[in-house]
Amino acid sequence: MADHGIPRLDPALGYPHARYAALGAESSDGGILEAGRILYQADGIFPITFLEARVSMGYTGKKVGPLTILYQVFGRKFNPFDKSDTDRIERAIHKLQREHAGDLWQRAALVPRINFPPADVGSKAQYAMAPFSDIALFKQLRKTDLHNGTQKFRATFAGLATSPRVFVLWVHIDPDADPAAISLQLRAHLHTKCDIHAMWAVDRGNVNAGHRLEFTGIVMALLTLHGDPERPPSFEEWSIIPGWVQVGDRAYPTFYRNRPPHCTTAACRTATTEFHLEDHCPNLRCIRSADSELMLVGVKETK
């Protein structure tokens, strides 16, 4: 893959001797530029660009994965816990998708079931999440709003048009920490589990004002989890991705779509810790009170 350099970026405004990936984000009036400083880059074509990877990080709350459209549902309300209601919404969406897609719908081998993520706290908005098994069908529909007599389904966000095993992992470290050290740690622990396409340090600055780009503290990795490229990873497969990375005496959590709830006990905050829930942590112990014979459960070892 080419470097996709940023023509408008004066080399004096970036880090010395650094190479930058594609433009991440730039405001139309303030000149705020965000770009990926290359920490590692494999040969070949990447499944997505730095820009797509950076944008995808903002939608992990609703876990919008590849080949998935998140619709906001307007009109007649539905109960997401009532199967008759959700079946009605699913039938309406699939019918409208079929009308818009035509022959592409007929050629799709499988149309997965729609699921219904919970609304944000304090919000009355309702959503339906429609996954696809066919990339061409997904591309045809990902920007299309759907309407019938009683409902409107607005295509609020579409995931990436790529294998469901492609994902972005990121770590938020101290801005004065060394992103190259985090990159080396991640590569050491991920290379047997994933194809590692690229790693970037996210830099940001007001280039119109002549300010240099400065490190934001975010290190990103573009990865493809090993396995069948057409099959979404299982919970067990996601759980082999390290939940923590450690440099020196600091441990940082990793973030990625479908990240399992890794244990947060101090002794478990390493990249080599085998996944387990905190309730089943081997570093938790029980203490019997000498005065009351009360069993205290879940006291964390601090050593």
Image: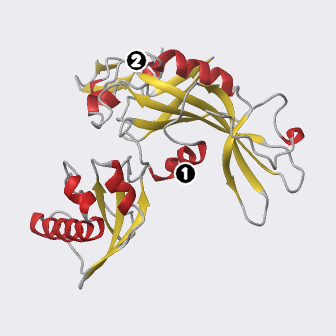
Amino acid under disc 1? Val
Q: Position of residue 74 (x, y in %)?
A: 32, 77
Q: Write down the residue under mark 2.
A: 273
Q: Nearer the viewer, residue 144 or 204?
A: 144
Q: Position of residue 34 (x, y in %)?
A: 70, 48
Residue name at image x 19 percent, y 65 percent: 90
Q: Residue 258's image quarter?
A: top left
Q: Residue at x 44, y 37 (%)?
A: 167
Viewer-side residue, 120 vs 227: 227
Q: Considering the image in quadrants, where does the N terminus appear?
A: top right
Number of on-image labels: 2
Q: Is residue 34 left or right of residue 291?
A: right
Which mark's residue is nearer the viewer, 2 or 1? 1
Q: Residue at coordinates 39% horizontally, 70% vertically from top-left?
A: 123
The residue carrying pointer 1 sits among few (fewer than 14), some (14 to 19) or many (20 or more) residues within 10 Å by Cα, namely few
**x and y percentages locating residue 177 in the rendered image:** 70, 28
Q: Secondary structure at mark 2?
A: loop
Q: Is residue 78 above or below residue 55?
A: below
* Residue placed under numbered mark 1 in the picture: 55
Q: Is residue 268 visible?
A: yes
Contact between labelled residues 1 and 2, with CB atoms less than 8 Å apart:
no
Question: Relative to 175, is 54 above or below?
Answer: below
Q: Amino acid at mark 2?
A: Thr
Residue 277 in view in this figure = no
Which of 251/127 is in front? 127
Q: Decide which of 217, 186 is in the foreground and name it.
A: 186
Q: Is residue 217 above or below residue 189?
A: below
Q: CA distance from mark 2 to mark 1?
A: 30 Å
Residue at figure coordinates x 47%, y 18% from the top left: 191
